[in-house]
Image (tube, rainbow, N blue to C red):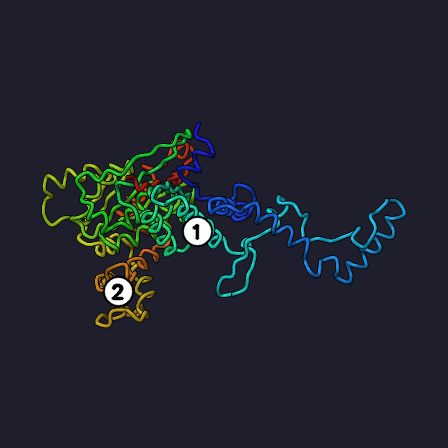
Amino acid sequence: MFGREHKRLCGFVFLRTLRTGSRALSLQRGSLLDTVLRLGGTGLADMWQDTLDRLQGLQPSIGEVAQLKQVRADIRKRMARFVNLAPGEDATSFFASELTRDNLREVVKLFIAAEPIGYSVPFGRLGTGSINLLVFALLTVIADLKEKGSVIFAMEEPEIALPPHTQRRVSRFVLAEMGQAIMTSHSPYVIEQFEPKDIVILDRQPDGTLNGAPIDLGAFKPKAFKTERRQFAEAILSRAVLVVEGSTEAGLFPEASTIMESSLGADAYTHFDLAGVSLFDAGSETAVPKYGPVFKAMGKPVFGFCDKPNKPLPAETAGQLADYTQHWVSPHKGIEALLVEETASAVHIRFLAAVQNREDYPTALAKFDALFDDEAKAKALALDVLKARKGEAHGYATIFIRECQTADQLPKTIRDILKAIHAALATPDDEDEGGGGGGGEFDALFGDLD
Protein backbone atom coordinates (compact mmCIF):
# COMPACT_ATOMS: atom_id res chain seq x y z
CA MET A 1 0.00 0.00 0.00
CA PHE A 2 1.24 3.46 -0.93
CA GLY A 3 0.59 5.42 2.26
CA ARG A 4 1.26 8.88 3.66
CA GLU A 5 4.89 8.21 4.54
CA HIS A 6 5.64 7.02 1.00
CA LYS A 7 4.03 10.13 -0.46
CA ARG A 8 6.11 12.34 1.79
CA LEU A 9 9.26 10.64 0.54
CA CYS A 10 8.58 11.00 -3.17
CA GLY A 11 6.19 13.85 -3.86
CA PHE A 12 3.62 16.42 -2.92
CA VAL A 13 0.06 17.18 -3.89
CA PHE A 14 -1.02 20.73 -4.74
CA LEU A 15 -3.88 21.29 -2.30
CA ARG A 16 -6.98 23.13 -3.50
CA THR A 17 -7.48 26.20 -1.33
CA LEU A 18 -11.28 25.99 -1.25
CA ARG A 19 -11.01 22.59 0.35
CA THR A 20 -7.78 22.50 2.36
CA GLY A 21 -6.09 25.93 2.14
CA SER A 22 -6.92 26.92 5.73
CA ARG A 23 -5.25 23.80 7.09
CA ALA A 24 -2.33 23.80 4.62
CA LEU A 25 -1.20 27.24 5.81
CA SER A 26 -1.87 26.68 9.51
CA LEU A 27 0.56 25.26 12.07
CA GLN A 28 -1.54 22.17 12.78
CA ARG A 29 0.21 18.82 12.75
CA GLY A 30 0.99 17.63 9.23
CA SER A 31 0.28 21.01 7.59
CA LEU A 32 2.68 22.51 5.06
CA LEU A 33 4.04 25.04 7.55
CA ASP A 34 4.52 22.27 10.11
CA THR A 35 6.34 20.20 7.49
CA VAL A 36 8.67 23.13 6.71
CA LEU A 37 9.44 23.50 10.42
CA ARG A 38 10.15 19.79 10.82
CA LEU A 39 12.38 19.58 7.77
CA GLY A 40 14.17 22.83 8.56
CA GLY A 41 16.12 21.40 11.51
CA THR A 42 15.93 20.65 15.23
CA GLY A 43 14.62 22.78 18.07
CA LEU A 44 10.90 22.49 17.24
CA ALA A 45 9.98 21.38 20.79
CA ASP A 46 12.00 24.20 22.35
CA MET A 47 10.26 26.70 20.06
CA TRP A 48 6.80 25.71 21.29
CA GLN A 49 7.78 25.72 24.98
CA ASP A 50 9.57 29.05 24.67
CA THR A 51 6.49 30.58 23.02
CA LEU A 52 4.22 29.27 25.79
CA ASP A 53 6.53 30.67 28.47
CA ARG A 54 6.53 34.07 26.79
CA LEU A 55 2.72 34.12 26.61
CA GLN A 56 2.46 33.24 30.29
CA GLY A 57 5.04 35.81 31.28
CA LEU A 58 3.73 38.81 29.32
CA GLN A 59 4.51 42.11 31.03
CA PRO A 60 2.10 43.51 31.76
CA SER A 61 -0.09 40.42 31.57
CA ILE A 62 -3.48 40.49 29.90
CA GLY A 63 -5.11 40.14 33.30
CA GLU A 64 -3.63 43.49 34.34
CA VAL A 65 -5.92 45.37 31.95
CA ALA A 66 -8.08 47.54 34.26
CA GLN A 67 -11.41 46.09 33.21
CA LEU A 68 -10.20 42.48 33.37
CA LYS A 69 -8.47 43.09 36.72
CA GLN A 70 -11.80 44.13 38.24
CA VAL A 71 -13.47 41.02 36.76
CA ARG A 72 -10.73 38.84 38.32
CA ALA A 73 -11.33 40.42 41.74
CA ASP A 74 -15.09 39.93 41.50
CA ILE A 75 -14.67 36.27 40.51
CA ARG A 76 -12.25 35.59 43.39
CA LYS A 77 -14.55 37.23 45.90
CA ARG A 78 -17.64 35.34 44.81
CA MET A 79 -15.99 31.95 44.17
CA ALA A 80 -14.27 32.05 47.58
CA ARG A 81 -17.68 31.53 49.14
CA PHE A 82 -17.93 28.11 47.51
CA VAL A 83 -14.40 27.02 46.47
CA ASN A 84 -11.19 26.94 48.44
CA LEU A 85 -9.01 29.13 46.16
CA ALA A 86 -5.25 29.55 46.36
CA PRO A 87 -4.16 32.69 48.20
CA GLY A 88 -3.23 35.87 46.32
CA GLU A 89 -4.41 37.68 43.21
CA ASP A 90 -3.09 34.96 40.90
CA ALA A 91 -5.91 32.64 41.95
CA THR A 92 -7.72 34.01 38.91
CA SER A 93 -5.83 34.90 35.72
CA PHE A 94 -6.25 35.69 32.02
CA PHE A 95 -3.83 34.35 29.37
CA ALA A 96 -3.49 34.74 25.61
CA SER A 97 -4.23 31.05 24.99
CA GLU A 98 -4.84 27.77 26.78
CA LEU A 99 -1.05 27.51 27.10
CA THR A 100 -0.89 24.09 25.42
CA ARG A 101 1.00 23.23 22.25
CA ASP A 102 -2.09 21.97 20.45
CA ASN A 103 -3.97 25.15 21.27
CA LEU A 104 -1.03 27.21 20.03
CA ARG A 105 -1.06 25.32 16.73
CA GLU A 106 -4.72 26.21 16.30
CA VAL A 107 -4.53 29.92 17.13
CA VAL A 108 -1.22 30.99 15.58
CA LYS A 109 -1.89 32.33 12.07
CA LEU A 110 0.30 33.41 9.19
CA PHE A 111 -0.13 37.11 8.36
CA ILE A 112 0.72 38.57 4.94
CA ALA A 113 1.23 42.19 3.90
CA ALA A 114 0.57 42.50 0.16
CA GLU A 115 0.34 45.48 -2.14
CA PRO A 116 -1.53 47.73 -2.65
CA ILE A 117 -2.96 47.55 0.90
CA GLY A 118 0.43 47.24 2.58
CA TYR A 119 -0.61 46.11 6.07
CA SER A 120 -0.63 42.60 7.46
CA VAL A 121 -3.81 40.54 7.38
CA PRO A 122 -4.45 36.85 8.16
CA PHE A 123 -3.70 34.77 5.07
CA GLY A 124 -7.34 33.66 4.92
CA ARG A 125 -8.37 37.25 4.13
CA LEU A 126 -6.33 37.22 0.92
CA GLY A 127 -7.81 36.32 -2.47
CA THR A 128 -8.09 32.72 -3.65
CA GLY A 129 -5.29 33.21 -6.17
CA SER A 130 -2.92 34.62 -3.52
CA ILE A 131 -3.66 31.68 -1.20
CA ASN A 132 -2.98 29.28 -4.08
CA LEU A 133 0.42 30.89 -4.60
CA LEU A 134 1.17 30.74 -0.87
CA VAL A 135 0.54 27.00 -0.91
CA PHE A 136 2.69 26.68 -4.02
CA ALA A 137 5.50 28.71 -2.42
CA LEU A 138 5.52 26.44 0.64
CA LEU A 139 5.66 23.37 -1.56
CA THR A 140 8.74 24.77 -3.30
CA VAL A 141 10.35 25.38 0.11
CA ILE A 142 9.75 21.73 1.02
CA ALA A 143 11.14 20.66 -2.35
CA ASP A 144 14.32 22.67 -1.71
CA LEU A 145 14.74 21.09 1.71
CA LYS A 146 14.39 17.63 0.16
CA GLU A 147 16.81 18.31 -2.73
CA LYS A 148 14.40 19.50 -5.41
CA GLY A 149 15.95 17.46 -8.23
CA SER A 150 14.62 14.28 -6.60
CA VAL A 151 11.06 15.54 -6.08
CA ILE A 152 7.95 14.43 -7.98
CA PHE A 153 5.80 17.55 -7.97
CA ALA A 154 2.05 16.97 -8.44
CA MET A 155 -0.38 19.86 -8.99
CA GLU A 156 -4.14 19.84 -9.48
CA GLU A 157 -5.49 22.68 -11.64
CA PRO A 158 -2.88 25.33 -10.76
CA GLU A 159 -4.82 27.88 -12.83
CA ILE A 160 -7.54 28.40 -10.19
CA ALA A 161 -7.97 32.17 -9.65
CA LEU A 162 -4.61 32.95 -11.29
CA PRO A 163 -4.11 35.28 -14.28
CA PRO A 164 -2.52 33.81 -17.44
CA HIS A 165 0.95 35.29 -16.85
CA THR A 166 1.08 33.75 -13.35
CA GLN A 167 -0.09 30.39 -14.69
CA ARG A 168 2.79 30.41 -17.17
CA ARG A 169 5.32 31.43 -14.52
CA VAL A 170 4.23 28.68 -12.11
CA SER A 171 4.35 26.04 -14.86
CA ARG A 172 7.79 27.11 -16.07
CA PHE A 173 9.17 27.16 -12.53
CA VAL A 174 7.96 23.63 -11.83
CA LEU A 175 9.36 22.29 -15.10
CA ALA A 176 12.73 23.96 -14.55
CA GLU A 177 13.22 23.21 -10.86
CA MET A 178 11.62 19.84 -10.11
CA GLY A 179 12.84 16.39 -10.97
CA GLN A 180 9.44 15.42 -12.37
CA ALA A 181 6.17 17.33 -12.72
CA ILE A 182 2.66 15.90 -12.97
CA MET A 183 -0.15 18.41 -13.49
CA THR A 184 -3.83 18.30 -14.37
CA SER A 185 -5.29 21.39 -15.98
CA HIS A 186 -8.06 22.92 -18.09
CA SER A 187 -5.96 25.98 -18.95
CA PRO A 188 -4.34 26.45 -22.38
CA TYR A 189 -1.78 28.74 -20.72
CA VAL A 190 -0.58 25.79 -18.65
CA ILE A 191 -0.85 23.21 -21.43
CA GLU A 192 1.23 25.22 -23.90
CA GLN A 193 4.26 25.03 -21.59
CA PHE A 194 4.57 21.26 -22.16
CA GLU A 195 5.94 19.33 -25.09
CA PRO A 196 3.43 17.20 -27.03
CA LYS A 197 5.13 13.98 -25.91
CA ASP A 198 4.46 14.90 -22.28
CA ILE A 199 0.70 15.54 -22.64
CA VAL A 200 -1.97 12.93 -21.94
CA ILE A 201 -5.62 13.71 -22.76
CA LEU A 202 -8.05 12.47 -20.11
CA ASP A 203 -11.65 11.70 -21.00
CA ARG A 204 -14.35 10.45 -18.64
CA GLN A 205 -16.86 8.23 -20.40
CA PRO A 206 -20.63 8.22 -19.64
CA ASP A 207 -20.21 4.98 -17.67
CA GLY A 208 -17.65 6.66 -15.41
CA THR A 209 -14.58 5.10 -16.98
CA LEU A 210 -11.58 7.44 -17.16
CA ASN A 211 -9.49 7.05 -20.31
CA GLY A 212 -6.10 8.56 -21.00
CA ALA A 213 -4.27 8.79 -24.32
CA PRO A 214 -0.97 10.50 -25.19
CA ILE A 215 -0.81 12.87 -28.14
CA ASP A 216 0.37 11.18 -31.32
CA LEU A 217 1.48 13.74 -33.90
CA GLY A 218 2.37 11.08 -36.44
CA ALA A 219 4.06 12.73 -39.41
CA PHE A 220 3.06 16.21 -38.20
CA LYS A 221 6.19 18.18 -37.34
CA PRO A 222 6.69 19.19 -33.68
CA LYS A 223 7.89 22.59 -34.92
CA ALA A 224 4.49 23.21 -36.50
CA PHE A 225 2.83 22.14 -33.25
CA LYS A 226 4.86 24.71 -31.32
CA THR A 227 3.97 27.44 -33.82
CA GLU A 228 0.28 26.92 -33.09
CA ARG A 229 0.66 25.73 -29.50
CA ARG A 230 -2.05 28.04 -28.11
CA GLN A 231 -4.63 26.77 -30.61
CA PHE A 232 -3.56 23.17 -30.01
CA ALA A 233 -3.85 23.72 -26.25
CA GLU A 234 -7.47 24.81 -26.63
CA ALA A 235 -8.21 21.98 -29.04
CA ILE A 236 -6.77 19.42 -26.62
CA LEU A 237 -9.35 20.51 -24.04
CA SER A 238 -12.26 20.44 -26.47
CA ARG A 239 -14.77 17.73 -27.30
CA ALA A 240 -14.47 18.29 -31.06
CA VAL A 241 -12.57 20.57 -33.44
CA LEU A 242 -13.69 22.58 -36.46
CA VAL A 243 -10.72 23.46 -38.68
CA VAL A 244 -11.19 26.49 -40.92
CA GLU A 245 -8.84 28.22 -43.32
CA GLY A 246 -8.65 31.70 -41.81
CA SER A 247 -9.44 34.11 -39.01
CA THR A 248 -12.57 35.38 -40.78
CA GLU A 249 -14.19 31.94 -40.62
CA ALA A 250 -12.91 31.39 -37.07
CA GLY A 251 -14.68 34.58 -36.00
CA LEU A 252 -18.02 34.11 -37.75
CA PHE A 253 -18.82 30.48 -36.88
CA PRO A 254 -19.29 31.13 -33.12
CA GLU A 255 -21.57 34.06 -33.96
CA ALA A 256 -23.59 31.91 -36.33
CA SER A 257 -23.83 29.26 -33.61
CA THR A 258 -25.23 31.89 -31.23
CA ILE A 259 -27.92 32.81 -33.76
CA MET A 260 -28.81 29.14 -34.26
CA GLU A 261 -29.23 28.64 -30.52
CA SER A 262 -31.29 31.79 -29.95
CA SER A 263 -33.48 31.12 -33.00
CA LEU A 264 -34.03 27.36 -32.70
CA GLY A 265 -33.81 27.10 -28.92
CA ALA A 266 -31.37 25.20 -26.72
CA ASP A 267 -33.51 22.04 -26.96
CA ALA A 268 -33.09 21.88 -30.73
CA TYR A 269 -29.53 23.15 -31.16
CA THR A 270 -26.44 23.11 -28.94
CA HIS A 271 -24.11 26.10 -29.07
CA PHE A 272 -20.42 25.45 -29.82
CA ASP A 273 -19.43 26.53 -26.30
CA LEU A 274 -21.78 24.03 -24.69
CA ALA A 275 -21.07 21.27 -27.20
CA GLY A 276 -17.32 21.70 -26.58
CA VAL A 277 -16.35 22.59 -30.16
CA SER A 278 -13.06 24.42 -30.60
CA LEU A 279 -12.27 26.52 -33.71
CA PHE A 280 -8.82 26.00 -35.25
CA ASP A 281 -7.45 28.52 -37.76
CA ALA A 282 -5.29 26.59 -40.23
CA GLY A 283 -4.02 29.79 -41.88
CA SER A 284 -4.88 28.88 -45.48
CA GLU A 285 -7.12 26.60 -47.50
CA THR A 286 -4.19 24.39 -48.48
CA ALA A 287 -3.27 23.87 -44.80
CA VAL A 288 -6.70 22.60 -43.72
CA PRO A 289 -6.25 18.97 -44.84
CA LYS A 290 -3.07 18.29 -42.81
CA TYR A 291 -4.84 18.79 -39.47
CA GLY A 292 -7.34 15.98 -40.02
CA PRO A 293 -4.91 13.15 -39.15
CA VAL A 294 -3.57 15.07 -36.12
CA PHE A 295 -6.91 15.53 -34.38
CA LYS A 296 -8.13 12.10 -35.43
CA ALA A 297 -5.08 10.63 -33.68
CA MET A 298 -6.14 12.50 -30.55
CA GLY A 299 -9.45 10.65 -30.70
CA LYS A 300 -11.51 13.78 -31.35
CA PRO A 301 -14.28 14.28 -33.90
CA VAL A 302 -12.73 16.71 -36.38
CA PHE A 303 -14.60 18.77 -38.96
CA GLY A 304 -13.16 20.90 -41.75
CA PHE A 305 -14.29 23.75 -43.98
CA CYS A 306 -12.37 25.52 -46.73
CA ASP A 307 -12.79 27.44 -49.99
CA LYS A 308 -13.23 25.85 -53.38
CA PRO A 309 -9.70 24.86 -54.54
CA ASN A 310 -8.23 26.39 -57.70
CA LYS A 311 -7.15 22.96 -58.95
CA PRO A 312 -7.78 19.31 -58.06
CA LEU A 313 -6.23 18.18 -54.79
CA PRO A 314 -3.22 15.83 -54.90
CA ALA A 315 -3.74 12.27 -53.72
CA GLU A 316 -1.89 12.84 -50.42
CA THR A 317 -4.07 15.83 -49.54
CA ALA A 318 -7.25 13.94 -50.43
CA GLY A 319 -6.11 11.15 -48.11
CA GLN A 320 -5.71 13.63 -45.26
CA LEU A 321 -9.21 14.94 -45.83
CA ALA A 322 -10.48 11.39 -45.46
CA ASP A 323 -9.40 11.51 -41.80
CA TYR A 324 -11.97 14.21 -41.10
CA THR A 325 -15.21 13.12 -39.49
CA GLN A 326 -16.86 15.44 -42.03
CA HIS A 327 -15.48 18.20 -44.20
CA TRP A 328 -17.05 20.75 -46.51
CA VAL A 329 -15.83 22.74 -49.50
CA SER A 330 -17.39 26.13 -50.10
CA PRO A 331 -19.48 26.38 -53.28
CA HIS A 332 -18.06 29.89 -53.72
CA LYS A 333 -14.56 31.28 -54.08
CA GLY A 334 -13.98 33.23 -50.90
CA ILE A 335 -15.94 33.43 -47.66
CA GLU A 336 -17.12 36.94 -48.54
CA ALA A 337 -18.83 35.70 -51.70
CA LEU A 338 -20.47 32.89 -49.75
CA LEU A 339 -21.88 35.32 -47.19
CA VAL A 340 -23.35 37.66 -49.75
CA GLU A 341 -24.62 35.10 -52.26
CA GLU A 342 -26.41 32.97 -49.67
CA THR A 343 -28.21 35.73 -47.76
CA ALA A 344 -31.20 37.95 -48.52
CA SER A 345 -30.99 41.59 -49.51
CA ALA A 346 -32.41 42.67 -46.15
CA VAL A 347 -29.27 41.29 -44.47
CA HIS A 348 -27.04 43.23 -46.89
CA ILE A 349 -28.85 46.48 -46.18
CA ARG A 350 -28.77 46.01 -42.38
CA PHE A 351 -25.06 45.20 -42.59
CA LEU A 352 -24.27 48.35 -44.57
CA ALA A 353 -26.29 50.47 -42.18
CA ALA A 354 -24.38 48.97 -39.24
CA VAL A 355 -20.87 49.58 -40.63
CA GLN A 356 -20.93 52.67 -42.83
CA ASN A 357 -20.54 55.09 -39.90
CA ARG A 358 -17.61 53.21 -38.38
CA GLU A 359 -14.23 54.93 -38.33
CA ASP A 360 -12.63 52.03 -40.20
CA TYR A 361 -15.21 51.95 -43.02
CA PRO A 362 -13.30 51.83 -46.36
CA THR A 363 -12.98 55.46 -47.46
CA ALA A 364 -12.65 54.45 -51.12
CA LEU A 365 -16.14 52.92 -51.14
CA ALA A 366 -19.47 54.73 -51.37
CA LYS A 367 -22.14 54.44 -48.71
CA PHE A 368 -25.54 52.88 -49.25
CA ASP A 369 -28.52 55.23 -49.55
CA ALA A 370 -31.77 53.40 -48.84
CA LEU A 371 -33.80 56.08 -50.67
CA PHE A 372 -32.01 55.88 -54.01
CA ASP A 373 -29.97 52.65 -54.16
CA ASP A 374 -31.43 49.26 -55.11
CA GLU A 375 -30.88 45.74 -53.79
CA ALA A 376 -28.36 44.89 -56.51
CA LYS A 377 -26.17 47.80 -55.45
CA ALA A 378 -26.50 46.79 -51.79
CA LYS A 379 -25.32 43.29 -52.63
CA ALA A 380 -22.33 44.48 -54.67
CA LEU A 381 -21.36 47.09 -52.06
CA ALA A 382 -21.63 44.60 -49.19
CA LEU A 383 -19.26 42.26 -51.06
CA ASP A 384 -16.77 45.08 -51.69
CA VAL A 385 -16.86 46.17 -48.05
CA LEU A 386 -16.31 42.61 -46.79
CA LYS A 387 -13.32 42.14 -49.11
CA ALA A 388 -11.83 45.52 -48.18
CA ARG A 389 -12.06 44.68 -44.46
CA LYS A 390 -11.18 41.00 -44.63
CA GLY A 391 -9.97 39.26 -41.49
CA GLU A 392 -11.01 38.88 -37.88
CA ALA A 393 -9.11 42.03 -36.82
CA HIS A 394 -11.73 44.22 -38.49
CA GLY A 395 -14.60 41.91 -37.59
CA TYR A 396 -16.79 42.90 -40.55
CA ALA A 397 -17.74 39.31 -41.39
CA THR A 398 -18.82 38.81 -37.79
CA ILE A 399 -20.94 41.96 -37.97
CA PHE A 400 -22.48 40.65 -41.20
CA ILE A 401 -23.46 37.36 -39.53
CA ARG A 402 -25.01 39.24 -36.60
CA GLU A 403 -27.40 40.93 -39.01
CA CYS A 404 -28.85 37.49 -39.78
CA GLN A 405 -31.55 37.68 -37.17
CA THR A 406 -32.78 34.09 -37.36
CA ALA A 407 -31.37 30.71 -38.35
CA ASP A 408 -33.12 30.70 -41.71
CA GLN A 409 -31.43 34.00 -42.60
CA LEU A 410 -27.94 32.53 -42.16
CA PRO A 411 -25.99 31.48 -45.26
CA LYS A 412 -27.19 28.00 -46.19
CA THR A 413 -23.67 26.49 -46.22
CA ILE A 414 -22.91 27.82 -42.72
CA ARG A 415 -26.29 26.67 -41.42
CA ASP A 416 -25.88 23.18 -42.88
CA ILE A 417 -22.40 22.81 -41.34
CA LEU A 418 -23.67 23.82 -37.90
CA LYS A 419 -26.58 21.40 -38.13
CA ALA A 420 -24.31 18.56 -39.25
CA ILE A 421 -21.86 19.14 -36.37
CA HIS A 422 -24.75 19.28 -33.91
CA ALA A 423 -26.14 15.98 -35.23
CA ALA A 424 -22.72 14.30 -35.15
CA LEU A 425 -22.11 15.23 -31.51
CA ALA A 426 -25.62 14.57 -30.20
CA THR A 427 -25.87 11.61 -27.83
CA PRO A 428 -28.69 9.04 -28.14
CA ASP A 429 -30.47 10.62 -25.16
CA ASP A 430 -30.25 14.03 -26.83
CA GLU A 431 -31.70 12.66 -30.04
CA ASP A 432 -34.62 11.12 -28.17
CA GLU A 433 -35.33 14.45 -26.49
CA GLY A 434 -34.57 16.54 -29.57
CA GLY A 435 -31.91 18.40 -27.61
CA GLY A 436 -28.24 19.25 -27.82
CA GLY A 437 -25.21 17.13 -27.21
CA GLY A 438 -23.51 19.03 -24.44
CA GLY A 439 -19.77 19.19 -23.91
CA GLY A 440 -17.79 16.27 -22.57
CA GLU A 441 -15.64 16.58 -19.47
CA PHE A 442 -12.10 16.87 -20.75
CA ASP A 443 -8.95 17.40 -18.80
CA ALA A 444 -5.27 17.20 -19.57
CA LEU A 445 -2.52 15.42 -17.67
CA PHE A 446 1.05 16.48 -18.17
CA GLY A 447 4.27 14.88 -17.15
CA ASP A 448 7.81 16.09 -17.50
CA LEU A 449 8.89 12.47 -17.59
CA ASP A 450 12.55 11.57 -17.35
Spot occupied by residue 111 in the image (x, y as percentages of width and height): 55, 57
Q: Could one spot residue 274 in this view of the protein?
A: yes
Residue 122: assigned label: none
Q: Farthest top residue?
A: 1
Left or right, residue 113 beside residue 439: right
Task: Name which quarter of the figure residue 361 lies in.
Answer: bottom left
Query: Residue at 35% across / 53% down in the picture?
Result: 168
- Asked whether the residues under the numbered discs 2 and 1 touch, taking CB atoms below 8 Å apart as contact, a structural biologist would say no
Q: Which quadrant of the figure contains the N terminus?
A: top left
Alpha carbon separation for disc pair 2 and 1:
68 Å
Task: Name which quarter of the figure residue 183 lies in.
Answer: top left
Dot 2: element: loop
Q: Which residue is mark 2?
A: 374
Query: Residue at 46% across / 34% down in the picture?
Result: 5
Q: Which residue is mark 1?
A: 137
Dot 1: element: helix
Left or right, residue 253 beside residue 80: left
What amino acid does circle 2 point to? Asp
Spot occupied by residue 65 in the image (x, y as percentages of width and height): 74, 61
Q: Could one spot residue 346 in this view of the protein?
A: no
Q: Residues within 10 Å of mark 2 (few under 14, many from 20)?
A: few
Q: Is residue 235 above or below residue 114?
A: above
Spot occupied by residue 322 in the image (x, y as percentages of width and height): 19, 37
Instruction: Indicate which label's residue lies in the foreground, 2 or 1.
Output: 1
